Image (cartoon, rainbow, N blue to C red):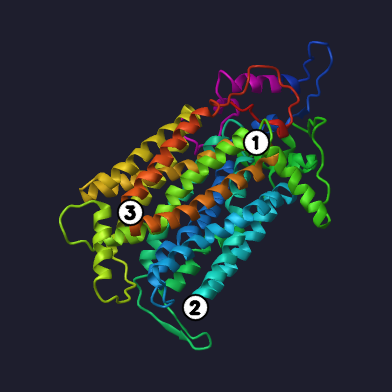
Amino acid sequence: MLTIFWCEKSIAGNMKVSVDTVKLQEIEMAMNGSSDKNGMKVDKTAASLDDAMLLSGFGIYNISHMLMSGVILLGMIMQSLALGYILPAAQCDLDLTLQQRGWLSAIPFLAIILTSYFWGWLADTQGRRPVMLFSMMISAVFSAFASFAPDVISFGVLVFLSAIFMSGSSAVVYTYLGEFNNLRHRDKMVAFGSSFVGIGTVILPCVSWLILPLEFAYPISILGIEYRPWRLLVVACAIPFALGSVLLAFAPESPKFLFATGNYDAALDVVKRIYHRNTKKDVDTFPIKSLIVDQHTAKTSNVRGLAAIWSSMKEQTVPLFQRPLLAWTALTCFVQFGIFATTNGFYVWFPSILNSLAHHEGGESRICDVLDAGRDAVSNGTMICDDTIHTSTFERSIYIGLVFSSMYIIVGFLVDYVGKKPILVVILGITGVCGICAHLAYNQQLAVVLFAVFQMSGACIGLMNAVAVELFPTKYRAMAICLSMMMGRVGSMVGSNLIGLFLEVNCGAGFYLFGSIIIVNSLFCLTLPNKKRIPHKKIVVESTQNETHEPV
């Protein structure tokens, strides 16, 4: 297959000949009414959900669904990282100290840490779509309110409330995206959808560059503020969530979730909808008329009362810390912690680091030497509030964002052919080494390039979520991903504050520590299972709730 952006002429033409063609032939034999080895007639209109997803094909529906999920991810990453540009521009209006900037930068991650678990449970019990739709709309509203905050306290509270609801979609969207694609294309589409995280790191400095240099100040006497460009940037970063809410309003619920909760007809209707969009054929021509259900599939009961909610959350959580899922829970949480701590932790301070490099007028020196010199100059002189950001800061941020998003796209193309495990091991290993070397480089341009490569470890976040979609059964999948993402947010909060501390006391130690963590993550990924393949065997009734691997 040359590219994923062409619709299929036939389902079999896009499946691997050695594996998927055999499976599709067996599906067709079953639908044609062939008998099994005992001479019993096979129902020619019934199939498992995975088989039905294979027959729905791959095309415009999958691509449009990936783009919608990408818009949601774009809103998530812009709101999470926007404070890196907003706070330097707002430090005079809000009278911010360096310590306050560090804690404000950590507020979105703290909110996500405290609420991801709840959102994961809600998504596994009430549905992926309603959770994301509700949370995104409320998050966008609170972001708009935050742009009018008169002081640091009100700004922090409103950002915190916005981040609480942003958490509802930050992890669920990966599950929602993965469950609309069959096993053949799932990894690839999750990887391409995750590329919008990288695209967000390009769009964010672009939007900041367009807005922050503007010179306007509209007084709002009732609030005692002047509406300056940084306040407009707060609103601009919430626009993708507003757009994502509109798009999601026309999207269906995940067929995997519908099937897992006993809504089999609704699940089949969604599959038919995918088939219709991909093939341009009428839904009545879809060969599957019913879905095969095994005895383990049970409909979720309605939850009432705090005791029932606690019992349901316990039921969703305990299996993640028991065999056979415990090993995968520990691995995904640890790897996400390290990646988020490194990528988001450094990115929060990234504009400040680049701004210091842009104002450096001496000869060639290491990144940490430049930062130390700037700090000493401030401590020895009169401190004057300056909220301007050098133009080169935006330019370099855009260049690094382009490399970042390119890595996501490259991963999306390679994942089907190479597999998730080799990509994770290689990327994490190389980026970890580059992080250590970035501190040692005396040439500023080389140091910035190595630092940019160091940030490429973030391209593995979506890939780890694709791993989790495959490792965990449908019943616990959203909870597992939310748990791993919650640990990632813990890493972001810990990383942003630790890096701020290291920049003050020992800059080089931060590069050594987080570079080593990424290298250790690379070694841990060696324990992941190899690329999942559809077995060469006759189709059997297989519950989507039991799609998991035994721990290594």
Please give the residue where the numbered disc 3 appears in the rendered image.
506
**Is residue 12 on the magenta stretch?**
yes
The span picked out in magenta is 2-28
* Disc 2 to disc 1, C-alpha distance: 44 Å
- Contact (CB < 8 A) between labels 3 and 1? no
Residue 64 shown left or right of residue 30 in the figure:
left
Residue at horizontal 37 percent and vertical 55 percent from the top: 502
Residue reaching furthest bottom?
A: 221
Please give the residue where the numbered disc 1 appears in the rendered image.
472
| Helix, strand or loop status at disc 1 | loop
Q: Earlier in the sequence, mark 2 or mark 3?
A: 2
Q: Quadrant of the C terminus?
A: top right
Quarter of the rendering containing residue 539: top right
| Helix, strand or loop status at disc 3 | loop
Query: Which label belongs to residue 151?
Result: 2
Q: Residues within 10 Å of mark 3 (few under 14, many from 20)?
A: some
Residue at horizontal 68 percent and vertical 43 percent from the top: 273
